[in-house]
Amino acid sequence: MIKGLAITPPVLGRISIGRVVEKNGIRLPQKDDQFTITSQIQEKDAGWVLHPMDEELRKDTPNGKLRTIPVRMLFNDADLNLRAEYTMFDRKSGRPMCIGNGDACKRLTQSGVQSLPCPGPTLCEFGKGGLCKPYGRLNVKVGDDDDLGTFIFRTTGYNSIRTLAARLSYYQAVSGGLLAHMPLELKLRGKSTTQSHRTPIYYVDLVIREGMSLQGAVAEAREKARQVKEEGVDQAALDAAAATGFGNALFEYDEDESVSVVEEFYPSISKDNHLEGCSLESKLQKDSKAVTSCHR
């Protein structure tokens, strides 16, 4: 295995609750009130090409809006399905510069990657000004065409990350560690907050599939687990292989996704408030003038 390369689940497509639009020559993220499932192909003018699964799931929905997606998890371990950390990216290259969990972090410095304390984004001088955000990646199975292929949902939203992390850990617990066999669905929820000025914001939840009870879902998971074990599928070995793959690199990073990360999560920010038009690599320099020059 190539060292330094994170081995992540195969990705067949992307799940999002927004899209990137061009406004005044600048590509900016725009939130939506429905899911969109895209392929991994991006056209120059039209953006991401819709995955056939998007049309298949959307055709029977009210008003054609996709607000639930039936899914299964690939792993029994909740933390393998959802990886979430505080992350600061270089806004030019999209490469991660610092990843932490609120206790400790790994930070790219001039002398290499260092392990340092992580106070969280609100108290960290290195990531202040909205540069450091929670960053979550959820891999789910949609459909039955590929047993190990997944669709990825990426988010920097606290609501989605907090809710998904709680649901996954709860379902893992109540199923007796059979999370991969639970019949679940992603569900779009809305809420209004003071910060959103009472405008609805949308986040992603994970629930038992419509029409099923928790008890019924657990019973199905147990039966499914028994069946696949008899057929020779070793779920524990799959989880172990995934854990090894994720741990094969300091940072989980996909070169192909770097531009998308910058466009979706780190759009151009007002010059009056934050960094604009310079690489975060300048923060690695010891010369304070180089860092100051990035501020307007």
Image (cartoon, rainbow, N blue to C red):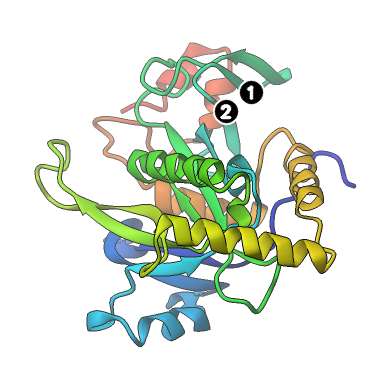
Q: Does residue 164 appear left or right of residue 111 in this picture?
A: left
Mark 2 → mark 1, Cα distance in angstroms:
6 Å
Neighbor class of circle 2 (other Cα within 10 Å; few <14, some 14-19, many 20+) is: many
The structure residue drawn at horizontal position 58% and vertical position 12%, both measured from the top left corner, is 286
Q: Does residue 12 appear left or right of residue 121 in this picture?
A: right
Residue 228, position as x, y percentages in the image? 75, 65
- Image quarter (top left, top right, bottom left or bottom right) of the C terminus: top left
The structure residue drawn at horizontal position 44% and vertical position 79%, both measured from the top left corner, is 54
Pointer 1 residue: 106
In the current view of this chain or complex, which residue is farthest to the right?
Answer: 1
Q: SS class of the residue under badge 1?
A: strand
The structure residue drawn at horizontal position 75% and vertical position 54%, both measured from the top left corner, is 235
The structure residue drawn at horizontal position 46% and vertical position 14%, both measured from the top left corner, is 119
Q: SS class of the residue under badge 2?
A: strand
Pointers 2 and 1 in contact (C-beta within 8 Å): yes
Q: Which mark is residue 98?
A: 2
Q: Nearer the viewer, residue 180 or 2?
A: 180
Quick one: label 2 or label 1, which is nearer the N terminus? 2
Q: Does residue 194 appear left or right of residue 234 in this picture?
A: left
Amino acid type at image mark 2: Cys
